[in-house]
């Protein structure tokens, strides 16, 4: 299982709506509105890197209002 933080930039005024919609996506553990260069941070889990990529590209980036994402897989050292 791979966990990752997905940092999301959204169109102005859409943060709460986008965070709520992302939270409803299967495999998303949490989704919260934040301040700073990103508007929403989601935590997601997937079986492998391919599934994580599909989750981000096909599901999270497809949410209306999302303009950019940055995916940071969690490392287990």
Image: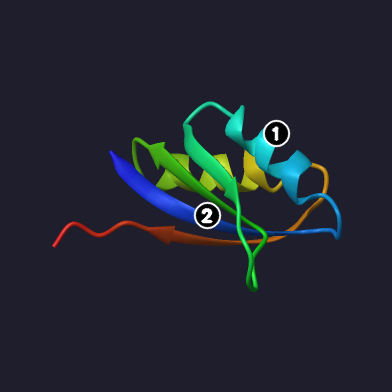
- Left-right relation of 62 to 12: left
Q: Quadrant of residue 24?
A: top right
Q: Is residue 62 above or below residue 10?
A: above
Task: Tell me what residue is drawn at x 69 percent, y 48 percent.
Answer: 61
What SS does tag 1 mark?
helix
**Disc 2 to disc 1, C-alpha distance:** 14 Å
Point out residue 25 in the picture as x, y percentages from the top left corner: 59, 29
| Residue position for label 2 | 6
Q: Is residue 6 left or right of residue 47?
A: right
| Residue 62 seen in the figure | no
| Number of residues whose C-alpha sits closer than 10 Å to that of mark 2, classed few (under 14), some (14–19) or many (20 or more) | many
Percent position of residue 67, x then y: 77, 59
Closer to us: 41 or 48: 41
Question: Quick check: 43 above or below 6?
Answer: above
Report the side of 12 relative to 20 (left or right): right
In the rendered image, the residue lying farthest to the front is 35
Q: Residue at x 63, y 47 (%)?
A: 57
What percent of the width, then of the height, locates residue 76?
18, 57
First of labels 2, 1 by sequence position:
2
* Residue 71 showing in the rendered view: yes
In the foreground, 44 or 35: 35
Residue position for label 1: 21
- Name the residue: 39% across, 39% down: 45
- The quarter of the rendered structure image containing the N terminus is top left
Q: Secondary structure at mark 2?
A: strand
Query: Relative to 65, is 21 on the left or the right?
Result: left
| Residue placed most toward the observer, 63 or 50 | 63
Q: Are the two marked residues, 2 and 1, in contact with CB atoms closer than 8 angstroms?
A: no
């Amino acid at each position: 299982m791979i966990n990752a933080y997905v940092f999301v930039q959204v169109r102005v005024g859409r943060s709460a709506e986008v965070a709520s919609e992302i939270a409803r996506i299967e495999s998303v553990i949490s989704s919260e509105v934040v301040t700073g260069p990103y508007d929403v941070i989601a935590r997601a889990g997937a079986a492998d890197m391919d599934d994580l990529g599909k989750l981000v590209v096909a599901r999270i980036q497809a949410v209306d209002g999302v303009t950019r994402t940055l995916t940071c897989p969690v490392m287990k050292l």
